[in-house]
Image (spheres, rainbow, N blue to C red):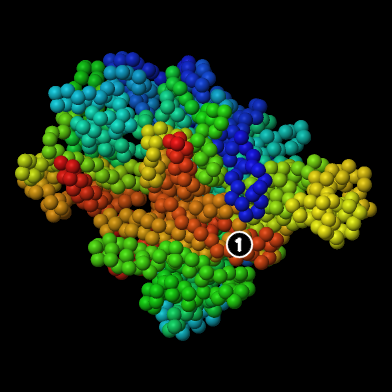
Amino acid sequence: MAGESNGAAGFGSSIRRREDPELITGRAKYTDDLKLAGMVYCTILRSDYAHAGINSIDTSEAEALDGVLGVYTAKDIEASGVPGGVPVGWLLPGLKTPEHFMLAKDTTRYVGDGVAIVVAEDQYTAHDALELIYVDYDPRDGIADPKKATADGAPLVHDDAPNNIAFDWEIGDKESTDAAFANAAHVASLDIVNNRLIPNAMEPRAALADYNDITGELVLYMTTQNPHIHRLLMSLASLGLPEHKIRVIAPEVGGGFGSKIHHYADEAIAAWASMQVGRPVKWTATRTETYITDAHGRDHVTHGEMAIDADGRFIGLRVDTYAAMGAYLSTFAPAVPTYLYGTLMSGEYDLPAIYCHVYGVFTHTVPVDAYRGAGRPEATFIVERLVDEAARVTGIDPVEIRRRNFVAPDNFPYQTQVALAYDSGNYEGALDKALEAIGYDDFRTEQAAAREQGKYLGLGLSTYIEACGLAPSAVVGSLGAQAGQWESAVVRVHATGKVTVYSGCSGHGQGHETTFAQIVASALGVPYDDIDVVEGDTGSMPHGWGTYGSRSAATGGSAIASAAEKVVDKARTIAAHLLEAAEEDIEFEDGNFFVKGSPDQSQSLPDVALQAYLAHNLPKGIEPALEATSFYDPANFVYPFGTHIAIVEVCSQTGNVTLQRYLAVDDVGNVINPMIVDGQVHGGIAQGIGQSLYETAVYDDGANLLSGTMLDYAVPKAHFMPSFETDRTVTPCPHNPLGVKGVGEAGSIASPAAVVNAVVDALSPFGVTHIDMPVTSEKVWNAMK
Amino acid sequence: MFPSKFDYHRPSSVQEAVQILSDNPDAKVLAGGHSLIPVMKLRLATPSALIDIGRIDALKGISRANGSLRIGACVTYNEIANSGVVQDAAPLLAEAAGQIGDRQVRYRGTIGGNLSHADPASDLPAAALALGATLHVSGPNGSRSVSASEFFVDLMMTSLQADEILTEVEISAASAGTGSAYVKFEHPASGYALCGAAAVVTRGAGGSCTGASLCFNGVSATAVSANGVAASLVGSDLSDGAVESAVSNLSIPDAAGDMFASAGYRQELAKAIGAQALRTARDRA
Amino acid sequence: MGISIELEVNGASVSEEVEPRLLLAHLLREELGLTGTKIGCDTSQCGSCTILLDGQAVKSCTVLAVQADGSEITTIEGLANGEYHPMQQAFWDNHGLQCGFCTPGMIISCVDLLSTNPQPSEDEIRHGLEGNLCRCTGYHNIVRAVQTAAETMNG
């Protein structure tokens, strides 16, 4: 039933996804769908206390339960001699890096911290046994608010991090920024909380570990966005097994949004348990467990100010942020509120002075790390909220003040005051397109008329830029990354001309098998159906860094394009030899090599491939076979941008906010598959709408998670959303071979500011200047009072 | 998630079910299971046994006779919402049932399970109160009847005895000139009512109000009646102004707040939603 | 204590001895190997486990296997009949899925929706899907898929 004709399946075509037939029939296998002979189940007992000493743990009753194979604590992991660590992978100057062990040793530091492990014959028994483990806790005070946690006397998460400060980071020029404020005609100022979010990929995390004590090999199937990173950290920090003896496989993965980037204790625990019991061990998080183990996102307390001159020009931006790290430093956590945040503070604006200061703060909460957008939604939110506030204090229309301050199209490359150099852009182009589509002037008329009748409509703009496509390795290395950020690809043309492509990316819903094949179909002129794409298995492909940070097209796609080019180069050499012509006279078109001017005498790529494999008649110095590997290290980040507009209606009786329209004009460079790009935009917008109107992880003053189930934490439903209106401008990326940028995060970066700006606009008759997210009906109602 | 172990009984009659319940004090009655199974999966409930009454035919009927609508305890929300008999005799109940949970839940959840569970944020309790429903229950000593207003005692607590089973809900069929409405302001995560208003109004020949009832879900520990407010409408012309004036005095005792909505906000929602329900009920009368 | 149950799953007769506490979702996934039905939450919110039980969409994580005794069940694996069900086809044609995890339950719910309301409005579709969560698509293309399937099935 699957399969596509080649006709229009190349780069730029909205071909249907080849992934889908297995998914719509229930055939696709996710980690929890896998079963191995002899497989047993692992569960993890978690702390109910935000902060507690562990006096003792009595596992005897659990061990005695029929069907239980073993019950383990941190002491057992220590005794086994494995390193047992869960390390941070991004270092900042002065960063405090307290020990993070696979299970809590003598102190639990958040509700959800692992305390003990059960391995049992079936999952019901494994859960029963958790109730028979008795932990004698010594409860202590906990703290969840990142700003309050820095106060003297606040409960300490780690004794060696005074005032709970993990790092103290700044970017920009404080002096020149202060000077700008001293000279400002107007100052816009906001105090905001960027709400804490729980990722909620629909597939809960899971791992199936199969350790073979004869060969010393571990095969680990797991829910991952980056199997090679997990292999590396499993080897170096957690298990101590040699890297080449670990094979990490990502089966079908049901969404990630960042939450499956990180190296957690749990998957390592499943692997360690398999090493103990000598049988395959599966661990699958319950949803309730994902709420207290998947790294959360955002959680900032921020003060921001914009200095504006008498002409409405932005002359300075000052931002001060307390960013929660949670109880431990998760894999990329320190990068998120620093290099993925402070560097975006220039937005789309020509801002001559910027200063951003960030405290990273330990709190007694689930660790915080990258979640769709990672730092850039937070930056966009404070910048775009301040721009609207600047419009209010100066009396300039929000559209006009943006136009007045945009980086002009002829001003690229544009060096910001916060490290990034924007390579290209046409911000007014996207803005104009969006304004026309939404009918801006008509809306203002309608809004005024509606207000006369006590109906409150609002329009919010978000003219955003983001930096993604992570990233030049030397640059991220200089900023503290303990990882490279290049990407790998192998393009293997088989003897029959069929093609297998291996990518170091690891998709989990993005449709790489389709889009990467489209790239290769265009590059090699091979029928789309003759190309397979393989990802997500450290046993099959060269090292790669995975899928996150909207990097797969820009880095992985570019690696594939580059490998395909190498294949064509080699095939051209062979074709020239076969056609008895000079290589420089050989043309390559639609998969055929021919001598310039004589297309009727040609060698197709499959012809050349067969000769390459037979190797009976190859040019001198040319090795047999036809494949190429590329390790592509990008020259720069890529910089998608655009304009998003939300229109809301606020009910004056209840405070309820209804999204009437949501329009996005994005510029993500060249587009490989428009249908898939639109889908990514839709999903990103929905998550941003979730953040702005519905979602929030609520901790009480004692750091207990109150929004601990899907009954309390509102993952948006279909009827919360309008149909989205999407359009594009295309400004190709100048520095990668495909001219592509990234699209995975754009929607979630742009949309929170658009929605909140719209609500504030609707409530302007009430003198409302800001409402924190999520903008619940009660907050609106209170603001209207 | 995984429920704890329990014994399973599948009686074929109410008498048998009551007998098993009497013999197993820690047992719970299972109807559709859509209130009970979720809390068992979270191990917030660990009954020693479940008594599955889902196959007792006597509990599955909808009938109307002598001006009285009778609905068996195991009738599902979906059946209530789509029953022509219920839509005609107690449209308020059909409207409320159609707003519970989602379509999957409505196929399984039952009126008996819902009312016995007595979740104040669910949609049926206020409707049952507003309609003055009579609840028939069976126990080892036979059957008795309880009015809805006496049934809901406290948060998730009813006047059902441990060995009693709710078997049937009886409602007087709506008379001519009566209109009703259920309006819900839902919690965005759970879909339960942050505030749900059930209103019934009756207009006399001249159009003035001859009877009114207004009850709320989601605001306090049980579904509550604001019939004092509703009564103040009697004799009025039920104009928007009259409705506004009546609800302006609304104050629900013991309104409760949580992390999503404070008690004070719920009071305000009750006024807005209550007025909306009354206006809609009036328009339908 | 095992209890004997008999059901018809995707047209095949099944007899099993089950623990009373076994959830129908676990019976399907673990005992019968029908892993197309997913489990995405513990609180009956997400709808990933939706199946047809005697023709009605239910959340199989909130039904005990013993409650399903004597029933006919259709899971996502049983929906296609030689060719894709129009709803499956419409999800594919309209890019109504990304990661695919919610998709089996979503498709089953959509089939149920059209069985009771063959020509739903967009608003009815969106409300009809309140028992199924999707984190990838923002529901936009799922709505398009249901509209397309409705056209096909009514055509």
Q: Chain of mark 1?
A: A
Name the spot of residue A668 as percent of width and height, x first: 58, 61
In the displayed structure, would residue B14 be above or below residue A305? above
Residue at image point 35% right, 22% down: B54
Name the image quarter holding the N terminus of chain A: top right
Name the spot of residue A132 as percent of width and height, x first: 50, 31
Q: Quadrant of residue A741?
A: bottom right
- Tell me if B230 is positioned left or right of A698 in this view: left
Mark 1: which amino acid?
A: Gly
Q: Secondary structure at mark 1?
A: loop
Name the spot of residue C116 as percent of width and height, x first: 37, 33
Name the image quarter holding the C terminus of chain A: bottom left
Q: Quadrant of residue A538?
A: top right
In the displayed structure, would residue B284 be above or below residue B27? below
Q: Quadrant of residue A97?
A: bottom right
**Observer-nearest residue: A340 or A127?**
A340
Residue at image point 22% right, 37% down: B92
**Observer-nearest residue: B104 or A296?**
B104
**Observer-nearest residue: C2 or B202?**
B202
In the displayed structure, would residue A8 be above or below residue A183? above
Name the spot of residue C115 as percent of width and height, x first: 40, 32
Residue at image point 38% right, 41% down: C120
Residue at the spot of label 1: A669
Question: Is residue A167 something one can see in this rendering?
Answer: no
Residue at image point 84% right, 51% down: A601
